[in-house]
Image (spheres, rainbow, N blue to C red):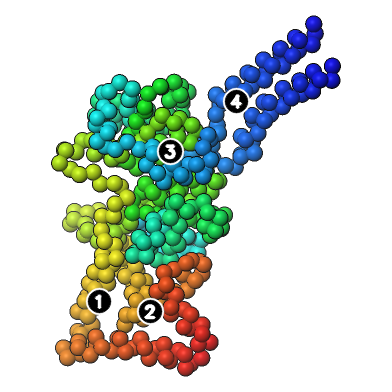
Amino acid sequence: MKKTYGFLAFLLLVPLACNRPGSADAGRATPEKLLVDLVEENRFLSAEQVADRLINDDPSLLLADVRSHEEYDAFTLPGAVNIPLENFLQEENLSQLDCSRYSIVFFSNSTVKAEKTWLIARRRGCKDIYVLKGGLNEWVARIMNPAAPPETASAEELERFQLRKAARKYFIGSSKALTPEPYVPPVAPQPKAVKKEVRVTPKPKKPAPAEEEGC
Amino acid sequence: MKMPASLIGGLLFAILSLLSCRQNSSSFALSPEETLRLAASSDYKVTPQDGRKFMGQQGYTFVDVRPASAFARGHLESAINIPLQHLLDKESRAFFSKNPGTIILYGKDEAEANGPCLLLRQIGYENVHLLEGGYEYQLAPDSVQYLPPEQPHYDYASVMAKAIEEDRREEEATRPKPAPQPVVKAPKEIIPQKKTKPKTAEEEEGC
């Protein structure tokens, strides 16, 4: 008798065990939620949107370059940290990319690699995460080499072009500040890099320690 | 007699709930770690050349995830259309799980079908693959070489250096206007370099 009741109790547990992952992971992504995200495309930020947040010194913004170390060393966006896709789930990288504190924008040369990282971050329950649409290729095409709008362009288009030109000026300024150049208004970009607790390439760090040592 | 009946009932209940558990499948078969390993590899991809080869062959089904309107305008030979928002519909799931052959997903470009393909893989449909280059590349003439999407289109560092140089020239062009002497140009190039050195020295002395 006891045995059969025990067996029945076990049978009742089977469906419970089956339901458990669903309820425990309530905050985490389900395939259906992930599909909605993929359809809605809210994950994409345009080059202009990211430039705007950078220029306005958005303190919650964290740029994550998911390309290789070599590519990162050659060029990256101001203040970006380097977390290659393959290393994304390593403990130290996950603690650095704290999506409860930062609004994270993943970027690579194009959309695909950054979106893979986004997908996995989404699986881990991150919400405030984005992908730079078109990646650095679009970034260069739209911000660094903006094509002048035609004479027939609408006011909106002209405005966007002005924004691109302003962004270009800003990024030239901030990268100038990283090299020993005569241009010396680095007050704005430098503390920003420190504020975000961002690992910057060795270049920008040099001026900062020098100042600290002095005091 | 009573016991076996309840036992059978219990067993039936357990089996049914397990079945419904599998069907509802609002969970993932791959862990984030496994997904990352797959995403970083090219194991789930089919090259554009292989895609061309497999087209129309038995055992290969091409699935177009673009909107129905785009599909109507043109699509790969013998492809079927499952617009992205219907990817996890009951019929679609049945199609993915019952298909014994290879399913090749494609979108406008590689980026459009990459997420959907990895989503299906995470759910556990191991027969689903991604067509590299997407529909656009299949339309391109044979002479056009396939470029992986993550290929940089520029040498970013030199684009930046060029922009800085252009900017400096612009500044130099605007500056001499108030100071008309062209002679200033030569020392200007030297002064800056000196400027930086004294500056750091000043700062150190200051503190």
Q: Is residue B15 above or below residue A136?
A: above
Q: Amino acid type of disc 2?
A: Pro
Marks 3/4 in contact by CB < 8 Å: the verdict is no
In this rendering, which labeled residue sits more in front, label 4 or label 1?
4
Marks 3/2 in contact by CB < 8 Å: the verdict is no
Q: Is residue A134 above or below residue A164?
A: above
Q: Residues within 10 Å of mark 3 (few under 14, many from 20)?
A: many
Q: Whole-percent x and y of residue A47?
A: 35, 56
Q: Amino acid type of disc 3?
A: Leu
Real-space CA distance between mark 1 and mark 2, rounded to the nearest whole angstrom? 14 Å
Q: Amino acid type of disc 4?
A: Cys
Upstream in the sequence, badge 4 or badge 1?
Answer: 4
In this rendering, which labeled residue sits more in front, label 1 or label 3?
3
In this rendering, which labeled residue sits more in front, label 2 or label 4?
4
Q: Which mark is residue A185?
A: 2
Q: Whole-percent x and y of residue B177?
A: 19, 84
Chain ID of residue with mark 3: B
Q: Which residue is mark 1?
A: B168
Q: Which residue is mark 3?
A: B118
Chain ID of residue with mark 2: A
Is residue A24 at least partly visible in the picture? yes
Marks 2/4 in contact by CB < 8 Å: the verdict is no
In this rendering, which labeled residue sits more in front, label 3 or label 2?
3
Q: Whole-percent x and y of residue B170?
A: 22, 75
